[in-house]
Amino acid sequence: MILHAWHQELECGVDLSTVPAGLRVNMQLCTLSYCMTPEKFQTYARMSQPSFHELHDFIKYDIQPGFTNFRGSIPSPNVVTQQPKNEHAHSSGGIEEDFIKCLAPTYVGDFALKGRELRLKGINRTGNLLVPNSNYCKFEEWVMPIFDAMLEEQKEQGIVWTPSKVIARFGKEIDNPDSIYYWAYKNKIPVFCPALTDGALGDMFFFHSYKNSGLVVDLVEDIRFVNTQAVYAVNSGLIILGGGLIKHHTCNANLMRNGADFSVFVNTGNEFDGSDSGARPDEAISWGKIKITASPVKVHADASLIFPILVAETFAGRQKEIEEFNKRVQ
């Protein structure tokens, strides 16, 4: 009954972007306590031996983060502001949901809410998050004029659009510090999404192809850039949150250099389903995607819980060094 009443009054729900008061935690003490708690958290604590230690020396590495759409659903632009200017690989859901949350609220719901009841009310469920249909209407209203302008630039200036260029353009246009990709644009961090059409953004491309056809997005330029970055990196490190396409795409780029020097996977996937998503880093070593001399780590946990702590223990604590590094590479 409580859940039913809650989603009947959706506008009274909790906006996902609203952080509850009193949730300030000393991350260093939190990490220390993980060493003495159940196995999953001990695994996180063991990241300090040695891959997590290597993260402390991240300036020596070309770090390639990758994550799936759950990160885009959760507003965390500070993660991008705390990192050096390396490329990211994301899923399509991670792109569109970042912009949608800047246009309209995403609400905290419950995994147990009934799909039929939500459908009748025009509400879409993503895990325990609720996204009203009206959010996607606002997204379409925002995207279509941008696509029109991009098409004109393609015709008049000969611009070859790629997924990373599209994402950078969106980051510029959204002009909102709550957006991950606004900060990626501001910090000149390229973001790659080889499956840009897999989601609501793909719907927008589809609709636009009938309203004002001709817009072309080239994947080849981006894959060449990603693989070349891996090949020429002095050292290469992977931080992969979730699985699926972004995990395979990022690891495969490091195949071109005979393997990444270190790797941290954070996901809840199980290797016994036979997919790449749940595969342990050792499988990637067999393919040459991680070096045989590396000591990779996989944390079987919810990345939305683990990654902020990881950042607090590494990038966030070395902000001055990041700024100095960014000045040197500009």
Image (spheres, rainbow, N blue to C red):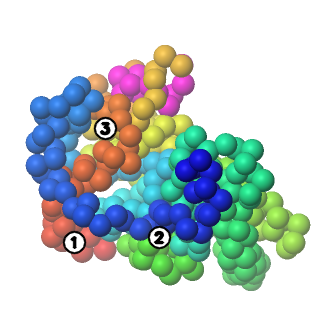
Q: Secondary structure at mark 2?
A: loop
Of tags 3 and 2, which is closer to the observer?
2
Q: Quadrant of residue 36?
A: top left
The label number, if any, that marks residue 179 in the structure image: 2
Residue, disc 3 = 263
Q: Position of residue 286 (x, y in %)?
A: 40, 21
Residue drawn 55% across the image and 78% down it: 174
Q: Earlier in the sequence, mark 1 or mark 3?
A: 3
**How many neighbours does mark 3 have within 10 angstroms: few (below 14), some (14-19), or many (20 or more)?**
many
**Mark 3: which secondary structure?**
strand
Give percent across and percent down for residue 105. Answer: 55, 68
Q: Is residue 280 magenta?
A: yes
With 226 as the anchor, is 52 left or right in this view? left
Magenta span covers which residues? 274-285
- The image shows residue 188, relative to residue 298, as above or below, that is below
In the image: residue 7, left or right of residue 312: right
- Name the kind of residue labelled 2 in the image: Ser
Q: Residue at x 69, y 73 (%)?
A: 138
- Quarter of the picture holding the C terminus: bottom left
Given residues 294 and 97, the one toward you in this image is 97
Q: Which residue corresponds to mark 1?
A: 323
Q: Amino acid under label 3?
A: Ser
- Say left or right for 176 vs 163: left
